[in-house]
Image: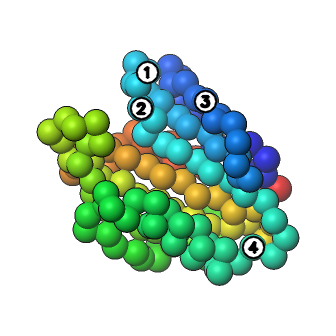
Amino acid sequence: MSGVGIDVPAGWHTDSPAGGAAEVLRLFPAGAADPVVVLTVGRKTGIDEVGVDGALDGLTRAWGGTAHELRRSGVTWPAALDPEAVTFTYEDLRGADSTWQAMAVAGHDEEKTTLALVLLVAPSGELETSAALEVAGTIRFDG
């Protein structure tokens, strides 16, 4: 991805849906039909905390009718400036009787030219120990 790197674990696969102004990379654990990490990268001059807020606002609107227990907070992400997060839960969108936990984290690079937004999902109660969170920890701005 342009300006951002991520380590993909052995056995996982990725895809990059076409279209849109931003680059998107979806990461799937071995055998999974759904991604557990979705990394979106946008490039534009002058990205700052306003851009980070805007990215999370857009995600919040997109999940608005589905998300529960939505919380926004600052977060530590050593690779990014002005990082913020949104956490929420949602019911399985395919009608299965399960609840999922999600966290979206956004931040930008030092040059203020690249914004990264990563969405992580895991079964409810498992996000903090999930492979998705571990993979997200490898995201870095490559310049």
Q: Which residue is mark 3?
A: 15
Marks 2 and 1: in contact by CB < 8 Å? no
Front residue of 98 and 85:
98
- Is residue 73 among the parts visible in the rendering? yes
Which amino acid type is shown beneath numbered disc 3? Asp
Which amino acid type is shown beneath numbered disc 4? Ile
Q: Earlier in the sequence, mark 2 or mark 3?
A: 3
- Is residue 87 among the parts visible in the rendering? no
Q: Nearer the viewer, mark 1 or mark 3?
A: 3
Marks 4 and 1: in contact by CB < 8 Å? no
- The residue lying furthest to the bottom in this view is 50
Front residue of 128 and 59:
59
Q: Residue at x 30, y 42 (%)?
A: 93
Q: Earlier in the sequence, mark 2 or mark 4?
A: 2
* Real-space Cα separation, disc 2 to disc 3, in angstroms: 11 Å
Q: Left of 57 or right of it: where is 126?
A: left
Q: Position of residue 105 (x, y in %)?
A: 51, 62
Specify the quadrant that holds the N terminus. Answer: top right
* Mark 3, secondary structure of its residue: strand
Q: Which mark is residue 34?
A: 2
* Real-space Cα separation, disc 2 to disc 4, in angstroms: 30 Å
Rate crowding at label 3 as few (under 14), some (14 to 19) or many (20 or more) other CA atoms within 10 Å. few
* Mark 4, secondary structure of its residue: loop
Quarter of the image for residue 78 reads: bottom right
Front residue of 3 and 64:
64
- The residue lying furthest to the front in this view is 65
Whether 40 is drawn above or below 108: the answer is above
Q: Which mark is residue 47?
A: 4
Q: Which residue is mark 1?
A: 30
Q: Earlier in the sequence, mark 1 or mark 3?
A: 3
Q: Residue at x 43, y 39 (%)?
A: 36
Which amino acid type is shown beneath numbered disc 2? Asp
